[in-house]
Image (tube, helix red, strand yellow):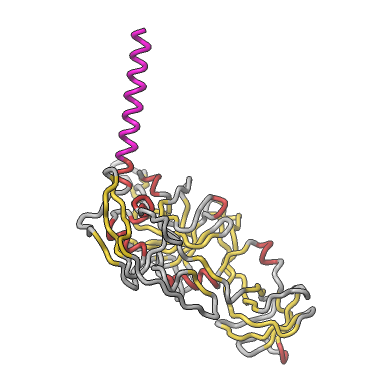
Amino acid sequence: MKNINKLLSLAIFALLLSTASFVLAEEVAVELKPGHPQQYTVVKGDTLWDISGTFLKKPWYWPEIWHINPQIENPHLIYPGDVLKLVYIDGKPYITRSKYGKRTVRLSPETRIEELDRAIPTIPLDVISPYLTKNRILNAREYSQLPYIVGINDEHMSAGANNSIYVMGIPEDSNDEIYGIYRRGKAYKNPANKKEVLGYEAIYLGEGTMERQGSPATIYVEKSKAEILRKHRVIPINRDKVIDASFMPRASDLKRPASIIGVLTSGMQPGVNMVGAMDVVIIDAGLKDGIEKGDVLNIYKKGLLVKDPIRANKKVKLPNEINGNLMVFRLFNRLSYAIVMDAQSTLRVGDVVQSPFLNE
C-alpha cells in the first residue's frame, strides 16, 4: 500500500510539474515586449508583423493573443483606424479591437490581391506580389506537359511585345484567353541528396492574348520583360483572379529542420548567395511537409568548423545561432516561397530554418 501511495504521489507530482512547465512555456510564448503600448491605432502603411512586434517579443505568437470578435465578417482582418487594446482575460494578455476603421475597396482589371486596398497586409505586399501572381515552381513532368512555342511571326528568332507567337499543345476547345509565357529556370535540389530535384523555377517572361485557336494556336504578346524564344512554355492565367493575401503570422510546427536553397528577390544577380531582410527566398519544405501560409520559421546561421586549439589536428563544429526569421507566403508541393522578416546579420543560401517550437 505504501508503495502504491508513493507511486501515486510521484505521478501527481510529475503531472503538476508537467502542467507547471506547460504554463511556463505558454507564458514565455506570449511574452510581451518591454515598453509595449496599452493601445495602438492602426494607420495606413502598417503591417501585421510590425504591429505584432510592437506588442510581442516574438511576433509569430500573435494568434495566441488576438481576441477574435465573431460579430464582424472576417475577424482576423485589421484595418486603418482600428484601435487595438491590450486587455487581460483570466490573467492572460489579449489584443482586442475597440473601434473599427473605415472599409473601402477598389477593384482593378488586373490580378487583384484580396484585401490589398482594405485590410493591412501581414507583410509588405509590394515585395511579395510578383511572387504571388507571376513566379511559380513546377516539377519536371508538369513543365514537360505545358504547351510550347513552335514559331514566331515574320520568322523572327525571338519575340517581344507586339509580336505574335505560335503555340502547340493548347486544347482547341480551351476557354482561356490570357497566357503567361515562361522559361525553365534553376533546378532546386534536395540539400540531403543533390541528385534529387525538388522543382524547377518557372521564370515569367511576359503574357499575351489568344488571337486564333488551332494547332498551332496564335497568341499576341502584349507585354514582355525578357526575350521570348521557341520552346518556351505558356500557362493560362486569369488577370481577374483574386489572390488571398490575408494571413496571420504563427509559429510553424514543421517537424524537421529545412534550409534556404535559393534567393528570388528582384535585382539579385545569378550566383549571389547572400540574403537580407525583405528578400524573398525558397526553402526546401512545402505542402508535403505540412507547411502553411503565414508559418514563421527561425533562421540559423551555420556554425563554423574551427581548429581545436588544444587537440592537434582536431576540428570542432560550433553550434548554429539564431540569426533571423522568415514567413512562408506561397506553397508548392515540396518547396515554398518565404520572405525574410528580419536578420541580425547577413544570411546565406544553405542556412538552416526550423520551427520556433524546436528551440523552446
Residue 14 included in the magenta stretch of the image:
yes
Query: In the rendered image, is residue 304 in sight?
Result: no
Specify the quadrant that holds the N terminus.
top left
Say which quadrant the C terminus sits in: top left
- Residue 25 horizontal/vertical position (percent): 32, 41
Q: Where is residue 93 in the image (x, y as percent from the top left)?
A: 28, 49
Figure quadrant of residue 348: bottom left
Residue 36 appearing in the image: yes
Q: Is residue 336 left or right of residue 127?
A: right
Q: In this view, does 1 lie above or below 58?
A: above
> Looking at the image, which residue sits at the far front?
71
Q: How many marks?
A: 0
Residue 131, image x, y percentages: 51, 69
Q: Residue at x 51, y 79 (%)?
A: 108
Q: Residue furthest bottom?
A: 154
Q: In this view, does 193 lie above or below 266?
A: above
**Residue sitting at x 28%, y 42%:** 310
- Report the side of 44 relative to 229 (left or right): left
Nearer the observer, 95 or 19:
95
Please tell me in which quadrant of the rendered image residue 71 appears. bottom left
Q: Where is residue 195 in the image (x, y as percent from the top left)?
A: 60, 55
The residue segment tinted magenta is 1-24
Compare residues 294 and 317 and report the one nearer the observer. 294
**From the viewer's perspective, is residue 9 above or below residue 319?**
above
